[in-house]
Amino acid sequence: MAGSNSFYGPLDPASDAGYVDAPPRKGFFTDTSVCIGCKACEVACKEWNLVPDDGFNLLGTSYDNTGGLTANSWRHVAFIEQPTAGGCGHGTDTPGAFAGMPTGPSVSAATAVVGAGVGQDTGTSPGVQPAVDALAAAGTIGTQFLGMPGTDLPGRTTDAPRSDFRWLMMSNVCKHCTHAGCLDVCPTGALFRTEFGTVVVQEDICNGCGYCIPACPYGVIDQRKEDGRAWKCTLCYDRIGDGLTPACAKACPTESIQFGDLDELRERAARRVEALHEQGVDQARLYGHDPEDGVGGDGAFFLLLDEPEVYGLPPDPIVTTRDLPAMYKRAGWAALAMAATAVASFLGRRA
Amino acid sequence: MAEAHPVGFQYVVEAKKRGAKVIHIDPRFTRTSALAHSYVPVRAGADIAFLGGIINYILSNEKDFREYVVAYTNAAMLVSEDFKDTEDLNGLFSGYDPEINAYDQSSWQYAGQQDEGQSRGQAHVDRETASGLEQESHGPPIPADVPRDLTLQDPRCVYQVLKRHYARYTPEVVERLCGVPQDKFLEVCEAWTANSGRERTTALVYSVGWTQHSVGVQYIRTGAIIQLLLGNMGRPGGGVMALRGHASIQGSTDIPTLFNLLPGYLPMPHHSQHETFDQWIDAIRHPEQKGFWANAKSFAVSLLKAYWGDAATEDNDFGYGWMPRLTGDHGIYQQVLDMIDGKIKGYFLLGQNPAVGSAHGRAQRLGMANLDWLVVRDLFMIESATFWKDGPEVATGEIVAEQCKTEVFFMPAANHAEKEGTFTQTQRMLQWREKAVEPPQDCRSELWFFYHLGRIIRERLADSKLERDQGVLNLAWNYPLHGKRGDEPSGEDVLFEINGYEVATHKPLSSFTEMKADGSTAGGCWIYTGVFKDGVNQAARRKPRTEQDWVAREWGWAWPADRRTLYNRASADPEGKPWSERKKYVWWDEEAGEWTGYDVPDFEKTKPPSYRPDKDATGVAAISGDDAFIMQGDGKGWLYAPSGLIDGPMPTHYEPVESTVRNPLYEQQANPTRKVYDRSDNLTNPSPPERHAEVYPYVFSTSRLTEHHTAGGMSRQLAYLSELQPEMFVEVSPELARERGLQHLGWAHIVTARAAIEAKVLVTDRLTPLRIEDRIVHQIWMPYHWGNEGLVTGDSANDLIGITLDPNVLIQESKVGTCDIQPGRRPTGKHLLDYVQSYRDRAELRPDHQAPLVTTEVEEEG
């Protein structure tokens, strides 16, 4: 163990960092099962923290046009359109949102008739139903449209029957790790541990060295191109110090983002998972809540409805500085060994 | 709801946490569907078939709340023998007049109804002036002794008429017509009925896209019929609620920005129907009719006293002669067409962006380009203020900036945080809003603008002796001025005037029952009387729900008389006892001899349940002790509307005006009474039985994204919102993408008889083809937020839509239409016009094209 307030240390980060009588550790519990993807968190965060916009780019990844957590987006709502066998509505009890919906040759009878130039009756006389032949035409002509550029979404093809579907949404944020790699590697002290156990960059100290960026196991912290400095969520350090709720949690209409004492949030989360399991949402699970995980547990943890990878989260994050003490030790031994070799060689020459 | 009303959706999430089942029915899988237990895809424009199927399920399985239905609805009333249903006449009701495309409603009435019915053409006038529903809310004159059959067995009773009308709306038909699998449909039926009755109630919440159909009023009616049959009206947790498009839309009909209404739903006088003051008053109160509208004269006189103060006297009919009169259709769409025709010279736009937000954007812009002057008050320089220099018609050469004669005055407006006032939300609750900051620079409130506009006009006219100017000159326009600049009228002063007061003492009225017909009271909106009770701004009450009971009556103020639930007499049984302990709300206290409960009873406080009126009683005295629906002429909730609705007494499935399929239920294709404007600049895509529907083979719908606000005036100007949805796009299913060769994130353009617009393609599983009858129908979806101003720009989806209106309220059909979609960008410049014309040519849409209103032979009435 190298140093009491850095690297891979105990699970009480604030007192470990030297705070006496630190307040209870604060954090976020983000319950994705009630997220409606409104992005109020993204906007509120930018409004409060004066974060610049991130550019106007249609990304085509469902309704996510933010793309990820960056220096200019400290909250990011991910949207996952997912074919699934588990029922719609965030994996609840009713099967088959799209079961029974037609697929395959998918042209309307009228279009097919026009396309084929067969001039079949399309049911346009009063009271006359569309001719069956028109439908047959649809079947045969429809295939002529195939071969166009592929538009299949991952996980299903147009020929496969529509079965089920769900749309997952998750507001991602800095995890405020117990063992924070970014903090460990910051050479200037710009990144520091607050009395609330959160991790904050001081914008007036950061020199833009960028060490913290590869040190984050989640890819959260990022350098702003315009000024070179590193930026990320502060868990609204300026608000919580005044007893206010962070901007994102305050703006969240469905209490998907909950702010509070981490211990209490963990209990609340455990109850919520239990309740969802009782309602048949078997896939509900927590992510980042476990002090035993590779980062000593996250200050901001999540309730997910699928594997973390589905949301773009690493399944088994490990603080990047975990092995540093061992590596230093090894490097030390290596240095000693080299020194010994050198000494030996000098001694040998004399000999 | 999660998509357009995310803040309101928190209550759905909360209910879900407590075990509520959430079902979402929508043509496209939205953010609401994502949180629902069950999602039901449906064809746009087929809602009456779907809801009619539910009515059929309720009636054929006897799932109705029978005691409620017998006591509080008109189920037992007998319908005239002359009435013929759409089931008999292939989609038309009896009384259809093909010359004026309207109904003579005489045959729809109750048996034994004394009224002679309408004169020929009455329905036509009602349609022109959107006044049919005034009859609905006021109710027809009903004698106390019309024949009824309380056993509901008589084949002519409303219950049986309704049952026959919907007998063909079976689950199989719903599947064929709406594309909804039968098991999914039955799941909805079972959930709705199981959650209704003595112990439980269900709320029906719709968003206003439901109203934007050629049968929009009948959509809502179908929902209301279900709610009445299941006993969900006037009870806690029940009701039909409209989620409004933005803040205080309820308020803008209460104190209307509509051409046909005055405050408190009093009708705007019509030049021939309401020539005299008494004619106007009698048209509202219907002498000999029962119900609270009998007091209409005191409401109307108080309004005129508020307008004209001391100048309004008994001798001059309180200034009635100064009131403007309707001469016909002055609805927004008629006005726009009149602008194109050069009949209208000036136009005020306040917080409205019709160049993007209204149907048929091209007509809107061409109309505005043909004015003498246009005043735009908005927060930003919106498309409706700049169309003349960089709108789409400038690109096509239809508008030449140098030649456009419209003089545009742009006045910067204060936003909601920069001015005080009230918002009235869907529960009819007024909530006071404080001013947080001063508006910047030249931005001013509407109150400031109209006060000073009125002041200046009155100064200009001061010496005028012209008769037409006397109404303006005699207005009571004396508002004390306040504020930093000393030129701002006070919102509270105006709310006080709206509330009403005794003229002599200036004492605020506490209830509309205190209003007088002799001119001794003044009040700007009778239904709002009480909002300034005791001289206190009741709308500003903010007691948290944690500090009061669950009805939370000390938060804001709800009209009328601070009632939180309308018609709440129905929350008790006919004897006045709560239907159940769980749903206890308002009840009769035998000992105290009065109605009591958690809410303000919507009934005369001391009228016992056993009260029965005399045969000759009229007005309030004619309301029976168990007539829960006190504003209706018969005191009953209407399952069947014996008059008032222009398109029929019962909702019937008609195809949208633009449809890809023939109406599977009737030879009558679409609403035969819809309001049409057949003009060369407003062509309608052909639909069956017309030929060439295949030129526009797909169904499209439009709506909102969470990230933007309506026509984008308040969101496309803000970087934090623009970056979240930066480009106009169109959503298509993978199946349609394959059929038309559309690439994800590639360009596509969408074509109708009005316009062609372009958008980026989002291929998504959230849209699905549907099987309708024997064919597969593809639906595409677009947001309508973009225009050519702001940080992010794009084509406007509303340009695609034509002008065809619901006959009752003159709202446009803008949530369903037909179109074609093709890969690639649209042509530009003059080529765009040629391109749209090439589609019209293929569809044989000539400039004089008229879609047939009647698609069946009208059978002679027996």
Image: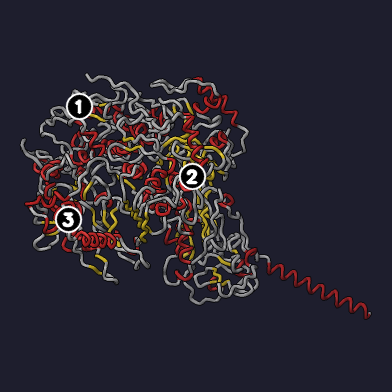
Label 3 is placed on what type of residue?
Tyr
- Report x, y in % for residue B495: 22, 60
Please name the residue that numbered disc 3 is placed on. B307
Residue at x-position 93% and y-position 78%? A349
Q: Specify the farthest residue to the front.
A: B403
Task: Tell which subunit mark 3 falls on.
Answer: B
Q: CA distance from mark 3 to mark 1?
A: 41 Å
Question: Which label sits on residue B107?
Answer: 1
Seen in the picture, residue A41 relative to B18 is either above or below; the reply is below
Q: Quadrant of the C terminus of chain A?
A: bottom right
Quadrant where the image shows the N terminus of chain A: bottom right
Foreground disc of the pair 3, 1:
3
Location of residue B260 (image quadrant): top left
Q: Disc 1: which chain?
A: B
Disc 2 secondary structure class:
helix
Q: Residue at x 47, y 48 (%)?
A: B394
- Residue B425 is situated, as x and y percent measured from the top left of the image, at 30, 52
Q: Residues within 10 Å of mark 3 (few under 14, many from 20)?
A: many
Amino acid on which disc 2 is placed: Thr
Is disc 2 in the same subunit as disc 1? Answer: yes
Residue B694 position, x and y percent, is 48, 29
Locate residue B366: give its quadrant.
Answer: top left
Q: Which residue is mark 2?
A: B396
The residue carrying pointer 1 sits among few (fewer than 14), some (14 to 19) or many (20 or more) residues within 10 Å by Cα, namely many
Going from N to C along the chain, the mark reached first, 3 or 1, is 1
Foreground mark, 2 or 3, reads 2
